Amino acid sequence: MNRIFLILIASTFLYNIISNSNVKKDDGLSIFTAKSLNILKEKTLKKTVVEKKIKARLTVYWAKGGDTDKDTARKKSSSGTRLMEGVSVAVDPRLIPFYKRLYIPNLGIRVAHDTGTAVKLKKASGGKLPVIDVFFEKKRDALDFAYNNPKIVTVSVYKY
């Protein structure tokens, strides 16, 4: 989240400099720089556009501490990406495609890397809400998060 915020501020700052400066139309270098910065701003804004918001049930899973499967213990995800704490979450890929970025309140930006049967069947929500399973290295950290944060949240799914 902080990185996106900084990129937005920087691109806005650069855009304001360009739009407020007296760039001559016949100055090829200045026009090229202005166009490059405008393209950078557009790409940055596209990456931060929210595609949809989803009310979801948050659950947790972990690699170390028992009660885990072989793939998770080896940090192997369904998408082939290595699971990383602070980055990976499991989702239903029919609802949120793999590699989409999500903003989860109290967590920040996460990436859809994994899935599982319980997530697809929406077990934790009794079949009512989509389930997003947040990956942690250690069981203790996962349970601390689960006990100290809301179970139902509104998640933003970014376009890119």
Image: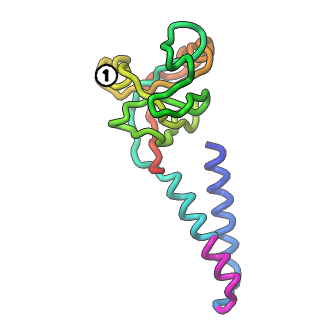
Quarter of the image for residue 15 reads bottom right
Q: Residue furthest top?
A: 66
On the rendered structure, is 126 left or right of 106?
left
Q: Residue at x 31, y 22 (%)?
A: 121
Q: Residue furthest bottom?
A: 26
Name the main secondary structure of what is drawn in magenta.
Answer: helix
Give the total of numbered labels: 1
Rendered image coloring scheme: rainbow
- Rendered position, 4 above or below 11: above
Position in image of residue 124 (x %, y %):
38, 17
Please provide the residue range marked out in magenta.
26-36
Examine the rendering and report whether any part of residue 18 can be seen: yes
On the rendered structure, is 61 left or right of 37?
left
Q: Residue at x 57, y 17 (%)?
A: 63
Position in image of residue 24 (x %, y %):
68, 89
Quadrant occupied by the N terminus: top right
- Rendered position, 32 above or below 132: below
Secondary structure at badge 1 equals loop
Q: Which of 83/124 is in front?
A: 83
Query: How dense is the environment of label 1, judged by Cα within 10 Å: few (below 14), some, or many (20 and up)?
Result: some
Residue 35 within the magenta-colored segment of the rendering: yes
Q: Residue at x 56, y 23 (%)?
A: 75
Position in image of residue 148 (x %, y %):
57, 17
Residue holding disc 1: 121
Q: Which of 24/116 is in front?
A: 116
Position in image of residue 116 (x %, y %):
40, 23
Q: Residue at x 44, y 34 (%)?
A: 154
Examine the rendering and report whether any part of residue 106 can be seen: no
Residue 151 within the magenta-colored segment of the rendering: no
Quarter of the image for residue 130 reads top left
Q: Label 1 amino acid?
A: Leu
Q: Residue furthest left?
A: 127
